[in-house]
Image (cartoon, grey):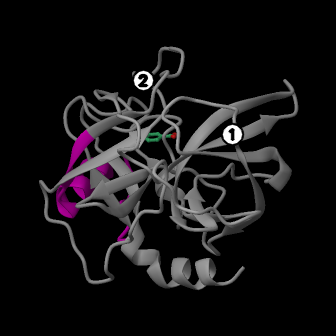
């Protein structure tokens, strides 16, 4: 998150951190974000290649990176159009993780509500994005010690489309843009929630390599995937 600040404990109780095991270094890294959307399901951003469920652990209900109480993953369900390509070349950057055991909501965590299918979000709607990703682009700063939050306004579809077209990238109808000067999600935030009016409206997906200034962040549009999401959170 660029341009944000520390989030208070319990303010974003659906935020999850995905720890991924790197066999080369034998280390667990807090790799990306996600949201709890159901007692046993969450959406994350998952590595595009060779996902191995035992190489994932889910941190829940804590604003600081923590090894304690991380949950195990039973199954990874990629959207059929989930692609190995990054960004604009991708189709549907959304996947679901099924936890091994359901969680019970507590004062530390609960799931986020999804938006109604008919909802649309006008340009300028204030939304929030959260994560443990980079706080500045490029420079290899250490990750933040606390979950970061930043307010990002929705950008109109047309403006976003034209902005990225200059770079030869196409914003699809299944994508949503948000951000303003100096405020953006960044590397390591992917999978995390874009929250508008307390609904999980977007999933951090891609954007400018430099995280802002001239290009907004691009999010997977949750309303485009509601039938798929609802189908898979019911099945076990
Ligand atoms: C990433 O690669 C990433 N500025 C996430 C968000 C943005 C860019 C890249 C948006 O995880």
Identify which residue is drawn at 62% across, 80% down: 232
Instruction: Tell me: residue 147, above or below residue 161.
Output: above
Mark 1 or 2: in front is: 1
Magenta stretch encompasses residue 50: no
- Image quadrant where one finds the N terminus: top left
Q: Name the residue under label 1.
A: 19
As helix, strand or loop, the secondary structure at mark 1 comes to: strand
* Picture disc at residue 201: none
Judge left or right: residue 173 versus residue 124.
Answer: right
Marks 1 and 2, how far apart in space?
A: 21 Å
As helix, strand or loop, the secondary structure at mark 2 comes to: loop
Q: Do the residues labelled 1 and 2 touch (CB within 8 Å)?
A: no
Residue 114 seen from this side: yes
Residue 174 seen from this side: no
Magenta stretch: give its range.
151-174
The quarter holding residue 20 reads top right
* Picture disc at residue 137: 2
Q: Does the residue labelled 2 lie within 8 Å of ligand 1?
A: yes
Residue 192: x percent and y percent? 47, 49
Between residue 203 and residue 198, name the one nearer to us.
198
Instruction: Tell me: residue 14, above or below residue 122.
Output: above
Judge left or right: residue 10 versus residue 178.
Answer: right
Residue 91: x percent and y percent? 53, 66
Identify which residue is drawn at 33% across, 36% down: 149
Q: Quick one: which residue is furthest to the front in this view?
A: 107
The quarter holding residue 8 reads top left
The quarter holding residue 236 reads bottom right
């Amino acid at each position: 998150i660029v341009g944000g600040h520390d989030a208070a404990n319990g303010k974003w109780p659906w935020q999850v951190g995905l720890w991924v095991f790197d066999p080369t270094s034998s280390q667990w890294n807090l790799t990306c974000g996600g949201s709890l959307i159901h007692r046993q399901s969450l959406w994350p951003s998952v590595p595009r290649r060779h996902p191995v469920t035992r190489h994932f652990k889910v941190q829940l209900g804590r604003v600081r990176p923590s090894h304690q109480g991380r949950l195990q993953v039973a199954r990874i369900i990629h959207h059929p159009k989930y692609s190995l390509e990054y960004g604009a070349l991708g189709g549907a950057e959304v996947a679901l993780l099924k936890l091994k055991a359901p969680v019970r909501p507590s004062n530390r965590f609960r799931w986020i509500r999804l938006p109604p299918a008919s909802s649309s979000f006008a340009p300028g709607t204030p939304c929030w994005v959260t994560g443990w990703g980079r706080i500045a682009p490029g420079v290899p700063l250490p990750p933040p010690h606390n979950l970061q939050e930043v307010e990002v306004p929705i950008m109109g579809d047309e403006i976003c489309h034209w902005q990225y077209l200059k770079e030869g990238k196409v914003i699809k109808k299944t994508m949503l843009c948000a951000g303003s000067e100096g405020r953006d999600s960044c590397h390591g935030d992917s999978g995390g929630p874009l929250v508008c009016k307390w609904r999980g409206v977007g999933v951090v997906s891609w954007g400018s390599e430099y995280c802002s200034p001239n290009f907004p962040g691009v999010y997977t549009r949750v309303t485009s995937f509601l039938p798929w999401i609802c189908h898979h959170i019911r099945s076990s």
